[in-house]
Image: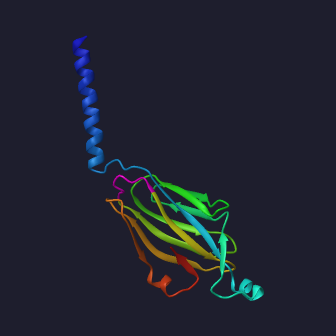
Amino acid sequence: MKINYIKDMKFKLFAILFFIICFKLNIISQNITVSGNVYGMLSDNDLALKKINKNVNFGGAIKGVKILVKGVNSESYVYSDVTGAYSFVLPEKGIYVIDYSKSGYSTVWFLLKYEGSGQKTKFPVTSFILKKEDNSVNDIGEMAIKDDGSLVFKPSTSSQKRMNVDVF
């Protein structure tokens, strides 16, 4: 009976050390949650009809925006709710294409490089503005989630020249 107890303790110790080493070497990555909001910007036609100041063209939250999360080994999507809020989980480290689209609005996409996250598991990071009655597709750049949990955004040079997309 004492021999079984020692074997059992050795196995438990080995299992614990294995998981510690895997996490330290980033062999096993943790799931992280990315969240944000999607808002609308009124079209030029709406602005002309309402005869409002061009600086007041905010259209509010957009419900039903499809957020596609496409990685090498996975593809999923979620929809924004009535407040424009969304969240999705990145199952593993890697490069993902994140695409925000809804019929009748511009489309925004970017590359997300999940390199690590430190101790962080939640990233309430991104809010986007899509322009109504605009069928453009806009590459806004790259976002990286670094090993220390920091976020780094590198805007696309082509999106800096256009006024129909915004990120904050």
115 versus 10 height, above or below: below
Q: Position of residue 135 (x, y in %)?
A: 65, 79
Q: Compared with residue 111, is residue 22 higher up or lower down, i.e. above or below?
A: above
Relative vertical location of residue 46 with respect to residue 35 in this rendering, above or below: below
Magenta stretch: includes residue 121:
yes
Q: Position of residue 65 (x, y in %)?
A: 64, 65
Going by the image, does 46 lie left or right of 75? right
Residue 107 magenta-drawn? no
For image coordinates 35% across by 57% down, the residue present is 116
The structure residue drawn at horizontal position 28% and vertical position 35%, both measured from the top left corner, is 16
Q: Nearer the viewer, residue 164 or 11?
A: 164
State which quadrant residue 41 falls in: bottom right
Report the front residue among 90 and 62. 62
Judged left or right of residue 128, residue 154 is left
Where residue 154 sits: x, y (%)?
40, 75
Residue at 69% x, 79% y is: 133
Residue at the right extreme of this rendering: 49
Main secondary structure found in the magenta portion: loop
State the extent of the magenta-drawn residues as a range.
Answer: 116-122
- Residue 75, visible in the rendered structure: no
The N terminus lies in quadrant: top left
